[in-house]
């Protein structure tokens, strides 16, 4: 393939009050992403003279001062580090009648705040700017997407998933229940509604994160670009060579007759060759090809690999999560824990994916067989945050290892050593529970270390979860299928994984 897979987050909202954290956000984005489009958030909650709290935009002198700082920051960082491009951008909401959009610039551009989407387009159409709609499936005229005013070239793709949930359609299989005040989800404004109306938009996912950049589990975007330069990235996003994932890193390629996702083409063929190549961090359950918004073809992958005999040398992925720990209601002063650890194998560590939801994490691959790491887990990264989603309690990694199936993986955590054979990892999920430490804490604080059941200790114990490992055949697919073609249609691929995560390709439009 001539394209590189680049992972990013088109929706990291840094607020006016967080501008002193811009460097910190940049460093976190650099750990998690391949490039970073900043989405400055110029809004805040103000107390009206009537006493009600209202979301409103800051005074324009504050906003323009922040905008100047962001543009200067982008210039400096792009000059210092050409391997990690960043773009300036901001969130635009207007009067709420057209839906919320994140505006990004290829180079530098003005921050403008008209009330309507059409006015935004008129002010920015000569500025190499795009405006990406998000949380589309909220109500029309109430911050949901207004497809009647949509302009394809100004908004080449849409954010199908974020921490808000899924805007695929009004009745899709992933919830959209984070915001009781903005919800519930409805029909007519979703991504599939927009495609059905004839709009040509690609598909991404991104975080809608307001407390840290690139938060794992809130959605990421994939971009197929020729290289990691701003020019190539911008070319890729204008051509809709993008895709979305709800959770961990996914490499997804979807083509029809060698036309890559985001493309339009014409053919006289009665059959189309669909090519799907995908690698996920979890086992793939199935892939569904949608035609004109409806399921057209389903490939069930689970039945293809679960009964396969594994070789003596096996390549596999498994996720390790760290966290849980004392209940804040019982131990209000214990809000975080710092972990130090190592992982060793007699085989080879092929890759490491960071599953990080907050700052304070690091990992160092010492050699092909070992790594060392430090993590800081928090009972919640959202305490006191206006825009915070549900509490986050874990940090972790996905390790890809190639080793003898009977060899050991050795995990050392805070001076304690734990061993699992590769065969055991492939067999089931397991837990490491620091129960003795929880009992010691209860004894220290309350003089209490015995009860007729384990709740007071287990419920307050730190834990490490080793998710069931999956062999390479489970998380990689490269498949072609011939399907009938009769009339003008658009197609997209949706990948379902066994942990509930999902990835979407951008559509491909085919004319007869």
Image: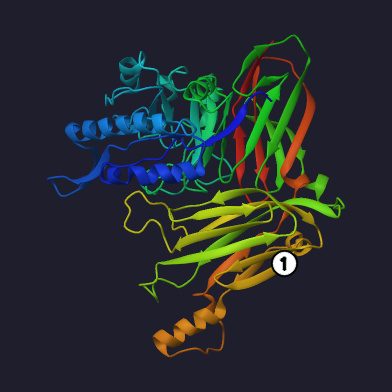
The quadrant of the rendering that contains the N terminus is top right
Q: Is residue 329 left or right of residue 509?
A: left
Residue 286 percent location from the top left of the image? 72, 41
To which quarter of the image does residue 287 belong? top right
The quadrant the C terminus occupies is top right
Residue at the extreme left of the image, as rendered: 49
Q: Residue at x 39, y 49 (%)?
A: 180
| Residue at position x 72%, y 31% in the image | 276
Q: Quick one: SS at disc 1?
A: strand
The front one of 319 and 85 is 85
Eyeballing the image, is 105 above or below 49? Answer: above
Between residue 216 and residue 263, name the one nearer to us.
Answer: 216
In which quarter of the view is residue 129 placed? Answer: top left
Q: Is residue 456 visible?
A: no
Q: Position of residue 288 (x, y in %)?
A: 69, 35
Which residue in the protein does label 1 denote? 420
* Side of 355 where 261 appears, left or right: right
- Looking at the image, which is closer to me, 173 or 501? 501
Q: How many marks?
A: 1
Q: Check the image and report above or below for 270 versus 287.
A: above
Where's residue 339, x and y in %?
A: 50, 65
Colouring used for the render: rainbow
At x 37%, y 27%, the residue is: 98
| Rendered location of residue 190, percent (x, y) | 49, 32
Using the rendered image of the protein, determine whether residue 427 is visible from the camera's viewpoint: yes
Residue positioned 66% across, 30% down in the render: 253
Q: Residues within 10 Å of mark 1 (few under 14, many from 20)?
A: some
Q: Is residue 320 positioned above or below 227 on the image? A: below
């Amino acid at each position: 393939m001539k394209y590189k897979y680049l992972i990013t987050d088109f929706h990291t909202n840094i607020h006016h009050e967080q501008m002193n954290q811009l460097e910190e956000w940049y460093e976190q984005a650099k750990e998690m992403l391949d490039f970073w489009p900043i989405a400055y958030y110029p809004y805040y909650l103000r107390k009206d003279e009537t006493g009600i709290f209202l979301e409103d935009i800051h005074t324009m002198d504050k906003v323009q001062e922040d905008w100047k700082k962001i543009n200067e920051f982008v210039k400096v960082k792009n000059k210092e580090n050409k391997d990690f491009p960043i773009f300036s951008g901001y969130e635009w909401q207007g009067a709420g009648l057209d839906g919320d959009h994140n505006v990004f610039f290829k180079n530098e551009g003005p921050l403008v705040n008209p009330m309507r989407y059409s006015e935004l387009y008129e002010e920015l159409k000569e500025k190499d700017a795009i405006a990406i709609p998000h949380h589309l499936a909220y109500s029309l005229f109430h911050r949901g997407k207004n497809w009647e005013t949509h302009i394809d070239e100004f908004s080449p793709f849409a954010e199908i998933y974020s921490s808000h949930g899924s805007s695929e359609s009004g009745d899709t299989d992933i919830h959209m229940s984070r915001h009781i005040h903005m919800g519930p989800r409805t029909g007519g404004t979703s991504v599939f509604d927009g495609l059905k109306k004839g709009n040509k938009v690609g598909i991404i996912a991104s975080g809608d994160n307001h407390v840290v950049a690139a938060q794992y589990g809130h959605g990421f975007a994939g971009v197929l670009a020729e290289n990691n330069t701003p020019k190539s990235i911008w070319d890729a996003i204008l051509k809709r060579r993008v895709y979305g994932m709800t959770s961990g890193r996914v490499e997804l390629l979807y083509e029809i007759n060698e036309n890559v996702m985001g493309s339009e083409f014409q053919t006289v063929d009665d059959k189309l060759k669909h090519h799907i190549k995908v690698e996920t961090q979890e086992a793939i359950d199935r892939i569904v090809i949608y035609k004109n918004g409806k399921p057209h073809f389903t490939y069930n992958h689970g039945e293809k690999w679960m009964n396969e005999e594994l070789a003596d040398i096996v390549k596999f992925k498994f996720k390790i999560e760290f966290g849980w720990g004392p209940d804040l209601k019982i131990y209000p002063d214990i809000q975080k824990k710092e972990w130090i650890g190592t992982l060793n194998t007699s085989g080879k560590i092929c890759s490491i994916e960071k599953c990080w939801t907050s700052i304070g994490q690091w990992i160092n691959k010492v050699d092909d067989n070992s790594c060392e790491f430090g993590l800081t887990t928090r009972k919640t990264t959202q305490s006191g945050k206006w825009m915070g989603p549900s509490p986050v309690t874990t940090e972790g990694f996905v390790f890809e290892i190639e080793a003898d199936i009977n060899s050991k993986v050795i995990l050392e955590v805070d001076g304690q050593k734990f061993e699992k054979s590769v065969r055991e990892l492939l067999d089931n999920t397991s837990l490491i529970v620091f129960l003795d430490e929880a009992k010691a804490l209860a004894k220290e604080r309350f003089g209490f270390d015995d009860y007729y059941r384990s709740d007071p200790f287990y419920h307050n114990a730190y834990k490490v979860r080793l998710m069931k490992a999956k062999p390479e055949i489970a998380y990689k697919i490269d498949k072609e299928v011939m399907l009938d073609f009769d009339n003008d249609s658009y197609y997209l691929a949706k990948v379902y994984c066994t942990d509930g995560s999902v990835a979407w390709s951008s559509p491909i439009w085919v004319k007869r």
